[in-house]
Amino acid sequence: MNPVRGRMSESAPEEVLADAAANASGAVHLGAPVPAPPRPGRKVVTGAAIDPQAWPTRTFLALASVLGRYHRHRVVNLDRLRRLFRSGRRVILVGNHALDIVDPLLLLATVFRQLHRVPRFIGHENGWFRVPVLRDISARFQIIPSRQPEEAAAALRRDGFLMLYPGAIREGGMRNYREEPYRLKWEGRTGFVRLALEADAEIVFVAAVGSDEAYYQSTIPTPQALISLINAGDGARYRGMPLAFGLLGVHLVPGLFPLPVRLTHVIANPLDLGDRERARREPEALDDLHARVWSECQRFLDRVVANRARYSDPLDRSIRAAQRLLQGVGL
């Protein structure tokens, strides 16, 4: 058996890592300056083909540095990814989703700086490929359209590192955060499991804590005209999506003026996918495997959120208390 494989539940429980995890090599604070020009002997960046010295990449890293300090960001258990990469395994990184780019931006920047890896990212076809500005970003950073599994499979085999959010807008935008906090909405989303089986890749779940509170989700429906603007003219598909508010008002532009909650990513061990060949051959076995993967990821997320006090600070606690107050009066 591959030594890097093992059930997520068999890892050291995140609730007992406590301060040791925060101070170990697996806990990384994002606040490093933008990398200087490469020097002889410097590690080569692998994965998606980007130019580390190009101005868009440096702008991306500069923004991540600012947001990393603003959110007091850190990544726990980064060594789990490092071990997989060193072993030569392909990796599909999946996580819980909130409707913004801040938490994936901070995670990707940390992985880039610490592990010198850049994943290929799967993005929503309307939001990333038809909206101005986002369309340019998706082209420059080689984001893969969500409905092109063949392209995703080819990228995973070639680059070895893929990142996606199975819940997509159903989880990030349509979910009621106050009634379903930190719930994975992965019904019918078997594609990432099938992809891992076909490419002989590991599935690694990363729990993002603080992402649900980075913007305040109100009970006010988002105007259909606004949905049309951010969904390339299709305002009906996400009718009723709750309107969110950031530090300076309505959340319109991704990554701008979120609330200063503390953001933490906790990386799980790779999931044990069991009999991969059987799951590839039999649709029922694939469905069972997907259900188990979904359940194990939700349990891991639940444990991390239940113990979020160790990932919090006074400002973070005060913001969440204010949000609970607003929810209590029905706003």
Image (tube, helix red, strand yellow):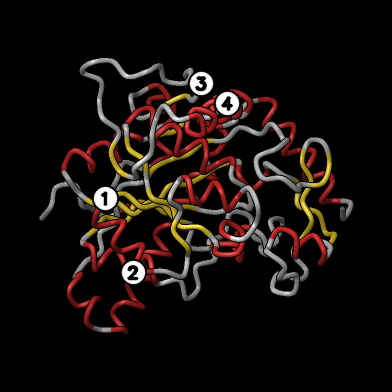
Count of number-bearing discs: 4
Q: Are marks 2 and 4 in contact (CB under 8 Å)?
A: no
Tell me the number on the disc at residue 222. Answer: none
Residue at the image position 56 percent from the left and 54 percent from the top: 97
Quarter-of-image position of residue 175? bottom right
Q: Are marks 1 and 2 in contact (CB under 8 Å)?
A: no
Residue at the image position 45 percent from the left and 30 percent from the top: 54
Q: Which residue is mark 2?
A: 150
Query: Which one is in front, 331 or 135?
Result: 135
Nearer to us: label 4 or label 1: 1
* 180 left or right of 303 in image: right
Query: Which one is in front, 133 or 3?
Result: 133
Give the distance between the C-alpha atoms of the residues marked 4 and 1, in whole angstroms. Answer: 30 Å
Give the distance between the C-alpha atoms of the residues marked 1 and 3, in whole angstroms. Answer: 27 Å
Q: Amino acid at mark 2?
A: Glu
Residue 92: % across, % down: 34, 54
Tell me the number on the disc at residue 72. Answer: 4
- For marks 2 and 4, the one nearer the N-term is 4
Q: Amino acid at mark 3?
A: Gly
Element at label 2 = helix
Element at label 4 = loop
Q: Are marks 2 and 3 in contact (CB under 8 Å)?
A: no
Give the distance between the C-alpha atoms of the residues marked 2 and 3, in whole angstroms. Answer: 37 Å
Q: Which residue is mark 1?
A: 160
Categorize mark 1 by other alpha carbons within 10 Å: few (<14), some (14-19), many (20+).
Answer: many
Tell me the number on the disc at residue 31. Answer: 3
Nearer to us: label 1 or label 2: 2
Element at label 3 = loop
Residue at the image position 69 percent from the left and 73 percent from the top: 237
